[in-house]
Image: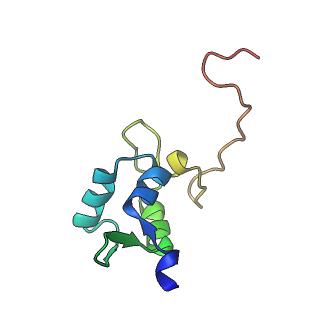
Amino acid sequence: MITEQFQTVRDVADMLKVGEATVRRWIKDGELRAIDIGRGWRIDPEDLDDFIQQHANRPHSDGKTVTEAVGRATPDAPEKPESTGMGKGKTD
């Protein structure tokens, strides 16, 4: 089914590590294209990729760019280094 390829507001919010209200605001403001199909907004993955590309180097609220927040590389952003598995406060 064609609608299975679309993502929900919750899916996008989880992926970008933002609240659902933020995603809805982007849709309302026309920053993120979405389709209202009656059960809620749906976002085409290509529209989400376009949104990420357009906002790739904009600082996120935590100081990261959107690209860094979702772990995607863009032509303008360097690849993210692989994690060593050592989080904050870990010594081994």
Rendered location of residue 7, percent (x, y):
46, 68
Q: Which of 63/85 is in front? A: 85
Residue under the image location 46 percent in, 46 percent down? 65
Q: Position of residue 14 (x, y in %)?
A: 46, 51
Residue drawn at (28%, 77%), measured in percent from left and top? 38
Considering every residue shown, the one lying at the far right of the view is: 92
Q: Is residue 72 left or right of residue 59?
A: right
Q: Residue furthest left?
A: 28
Res 83 → quadrant? top right
Judge whether 89 appears above or below 24 on screen: above
* Between 38 and 36, the one nearer to me in the picture: 38
- How far across and down, in percent of the image, does residue 50 sit? 46, 69
Q: Residue at x 47, y 55 (%)?
A: 56
Count of marks overlaid on the render: 0
User: Is 35 left or right of 65, judged from the image as shown?
Assistant: left
Q: Is residue 62 above or below residue 51?
A: above
Where is residue 51 shown, x and y percent of the image? 42, 65
In this view of the protein, can residue 29 be seen by the observer? no
| Image quarter (top left, top right, bottom left or bottom right) of the C terminus | top right
User: Compared to 42, does 57 lie above or below?
Assistant: above
Residue 86 in sight in this render: yes
Q: Residue at x 42, y 36 (%)?
A: 63
Nearest to the observer: residue 64 or residue 16: 16
The colour scheme of the drawn protein is rainbow
Farthest residue toward the bottom? Answer: 1
Q: In front: 22, or 7? A: 7
